Image: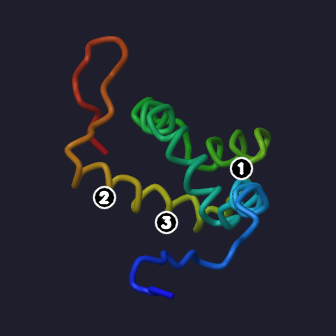
Amino acid sequence: MDTNNQQTTPSAFDEEALIEKLKALQPSKQQQKAWRFEKAYPEIEIALSRQVPQKSIVAQLEECGLHLSMGGFRALLESTRKQREERGDSVRCPGCGNAIEH
């Protein structure tokens, strides 16, 4: 028998089960918080530019299911600002279109 022309196949696996398990994976709670914060970030910066206290913003985030301590809020704020600055992605005033400074 000529074994040079035979193809070897990898071990069979349940592709559908693998796909379902991968779909079921969720990011960590910290990653979920960071993602949710990033989604709200433009409005957070706009509120801060209107002199809304950080404590009030944190309270509203809490009411909407994003639970952060003041320290956690400040850490995410600084981290998000830094990441967006590195990307050149600034928040713009909805009224005049100018970049909002923080």
Q: Secondary structure at mark 3?
A: helix
Q: Position of residue 83 (x, y in %)?
A: 32, 56
State how far apart marks 2 and 3 are (Cα). Answer: 11 Å
Question: Which residue in the protein does label 2 denote?
Answer: 82
Give amino acid for label 2.
Lys
Q: Secondary structure at mark 1?
A: loop
Asked whether the residues under the numbered discs 3 and 1 touch, taking CB atoms below 8 Å apart as contact, a structural biologist would say no
Q: Amino acid at mark 1?
A: Leu
Give 25 or 22, whichever is nearer the viewer. Answer: 22
Residue 66 - label: 1
Question: Residue sitting at 44 percent across and 34 percent down?
Answer: 42
The reply to whether discs 2 and 3 touch (Cβ–Cβ < 8 Å) is no
Residue drawn at x 56%, y 56% is: 34
The mark that comes first in sequence, 1 or 2, is 1
Q: Earlier in the sequence, mark 3 or mark 1?
A: 1
What's under tag 3, amino acid-wise? Answer: Ala
Give me the C-alpha separation between circle 3 and circle 1.
14 Å
Res. 102 image quadrant: top left
Residue 85 versus residue 71 in the image, above or below? above
**Residue at image location 50% in from the left, 38% down from the top:** 44
Query: Compared to 74, does 101 lie above or below?
Result: above
Label 2 secondary element: helix
Q: Residue at left 53%, top 79%?
A: 8
In this picture, residue 98 sits left or right of residue 45:
left
Which residue bears the numbered disc 3? 75
Whether residue 57 sits left or right of residue 47 in the image: it is right
How crowded pointer 1 is (Cα within 10 Å; few <14, some 14-19, many 20+) is rated as some
User: Circle 2: is it few (<14), some (14-19), or many (20+) Cα within 10 Å?
Assistant: few
Q: How is the image coloured?
A: rainbow
Q: Residue furthest front?
A: 1
5 displayed left or right of 56: left
